[in-house]
Image (tube, grey):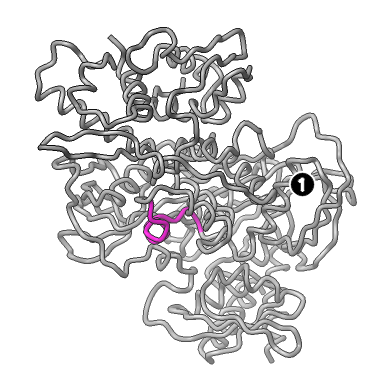
Amino acid sequence: MAKSPDTATHARRLLALLPLLKRGETIPIAELAAAVGCSPAEAAADLAALTMCGVPPFTPVDMIELDIQGDHVTVYIDPPGLDRPLRLTVAEARALGAALDAAGYAADSALRRTLASVSGGDASAADLERTVRAGAAPGGLASLYATLAMAADEHDKARITYLTGSSGRLSERVVHPWALVNRSGTWYLVAFCEGVGEERVFRLDRIRSAERLGVTFPPPAAVPLAVIPRPDELPVAEVVFAPGASLSEARTWPGATLETRPDGSTLVRVGYQTVSWIARRVAARLGEAEVIEPAEVREAVRALAAAMVAERR
Amino acid sequence: MADATERLVNLALYLASTPAPVTALECRTAGLGYPERQDDAAFLRMFERDKDALRAAGLVIEVVTNEETEAYRVDAAATFARPVELEPGDLAALRAVASAFADDPGFPFRDDLALALGKLGSAGHAGPLATSELSATEPDVQGPRARTIAEAVQTHKSLTFGYTNARGEEKSHAVDPYGVFFREGVWYLTGRDRDADAVRTYAITRMRDLEVNASRPHTPDFERPGDFDVRAQERLPFQYGGPAVSAQVRFEPDVAWRAERLSRGQGTLETLGDGSALWTVEAANLTALASWIVGEGPALHPVGPPGLLDALVSGLKRVVASHG
């Protein structure tokens, strides 16, 4: 069950509802709930609470008159004095800044500057930027994010140029953008790829470019949102890490199981989608890690490292 | 008697609609919901808390002093937002991040985000499907703690907490919080450790018994250094360790576009005549940079200093030897 908000937070939500109530309108309660970030049941309770509010002398014409019928509310009076949206508070400006950090919008982006201009006078944008940071998204991500968000919202096909991590090759694909998924700060696009006729997951920082095609795709009945495959669905490699080697990178070794051995080394069992992917991860440890099995991965690691040494002769 | 929430809404409506500023006494007797048998001191404390709550909701309350009596009303010019026109892509991006973080307890500011979107008129439309699991572990712990710390950063209030470091050592800390940041699944606090008298960074996942100094809530406990910038914490994996040296990495023309993505604002980028990108960046650990080059490859090459090339080649030779 969701935790009840404290009085001040609850009052903020009621005050946020007021400007959305326009005299003469009948509004779906679900729409109001979405607008203030609560459930329709909570919004209905809030609307009922608002009917008990008003201004002195609290005669019937001074009260907020609403008629709640089922999942709609009809508004009979403009809320006195608070019929327009309030400026953003410090907390709200901070929330927007943090969310946009995570999507790659730099502090000096046009969108961030626009939002700063509608924040309250005590919400110093510069101060918030220097003190709160919800992620350093890769550079150049914001416009890509916006394009794909629009395409997903409008069910518009997109053409993307994608760098496949395992092969290092760029490929052009027409996709149906279904969803944007964030895992530990990294954004992924879940999409149907027309070229392979199946759903695929694309890391946003490996998408070089994206353009909307203006061609509608049918929305899927259900969208699989597991962007990282379950370890039990993948082949498993056994990799031994030298004593003292860092293994804290959840992104580098997702879903791995670790076993400390008597000599201080760590045996890691990790699922992998492609041999080339895990070979590069192991080679990047520059001798701290050794694949025990399977032999095919072990050989791929040796071949990759040998080729890179040969490049530099 | 109205409940506390209704009293706050009544007070907001009263202060917003009154043609002339009203005194605390007028508010008390106007039927807004203040308890009738409350003593004067208790009423004034409640009235101050109510005004603070309304300010936190975004109302700017104008105070008019006249012959030692204060009167109040909403400053409409400072309170209401002016309409903003957002580009369709920006609007879709805002809706996507709001949708993603709305149900993610690891995002500390999700309630504020929903209210902000409502004020911008960007809510009421579901937006694209988006989800998030920001925190790699304990999102129900990390999110609220990060929110508490961000609030303490904003109000300049000191924190105390127990902490278990990477070596398993436990210690209590008193810290003046300067900033809070997120990196790869974990939220961090940066601030001045009062005992060490030095700026330190702490993983929120390693804290316990986090407390904000509750005494004198409206009085700052410390001044943050004017040059503090939490973005300086956003270093790449090879930028931790000893003294930094300048290093250069070349991106082949086919992957030159990745240089902006991967550099994350660190160092400088230059496009060479053949279309390659040359990245000059500070590195504190050349072996870690060599590892990063291999991991982010192919088509990335070390250019200098010589120690970087040595670290790369000797490391790769160790890989060949151990897998031979």
* Drawn side of residue B205 relative to residue B192, left or right: right
Viewer-side residue, A168 vs A170: A170
Q: Is residue B124 in view from this perspective?
A: yes
Q: Quadrant of the C terminus of chain B?
A: bottom right
**Residue A183 place in picture, x, y as percent:** 58, 47
Residue B316 or residue A74, whichever sits in front: A74
Q: How many marks?
A: 1
Amino acid type, mark 1: Ala
Residue B265 placement (x, y as % from top left): 53, 71
Q: Which residue is the site of mark 1?
A: A151
Q: Is residue A204 magenta-colored? A: no
Q: Where is A209 relative to A39, above or below?
A: below
Magenta stretch in the rendered image? A123-135
Q: Chain of mark 1?
A: A
Q: Quadrant of residue B70?
A: top left
Is label 1 in a helix, a strand or a loop? helix
Q: Residue at x 86, y 48 (%)?
A: A214
The answer to whether one can see residue A296 in this image is no
Given residues A90 and A235, the one toward you in this image is A90
Q: What residue is at 32 percent from the left and 66 percent from the top? A: B228
In the image, is B43 to the left or to the right of B182? left
The residue positioned 77% from the left and 45% from the top of the image is A177
Q: Which quarter of the rendered picture does the N terminus of chain B lie within?
A: top left
Q: Is residue A189 left or right of residue B123?
A: right
- Is A54 situated above or below A108? above
Q: Is residue B165 left or right of residue A91?
A: left
Residue B257 placement: quadrant = bottom right
Q: Nearer the viewer, residue A278 or A173?
A: A173
Residue A124 belongs to magenta span: yes
Residue at 40% across / 65% down in the picture?
Answer: B233
Location of residue A291 in the rendering, given as x and y in whole percent from the top left corner: 62, 63
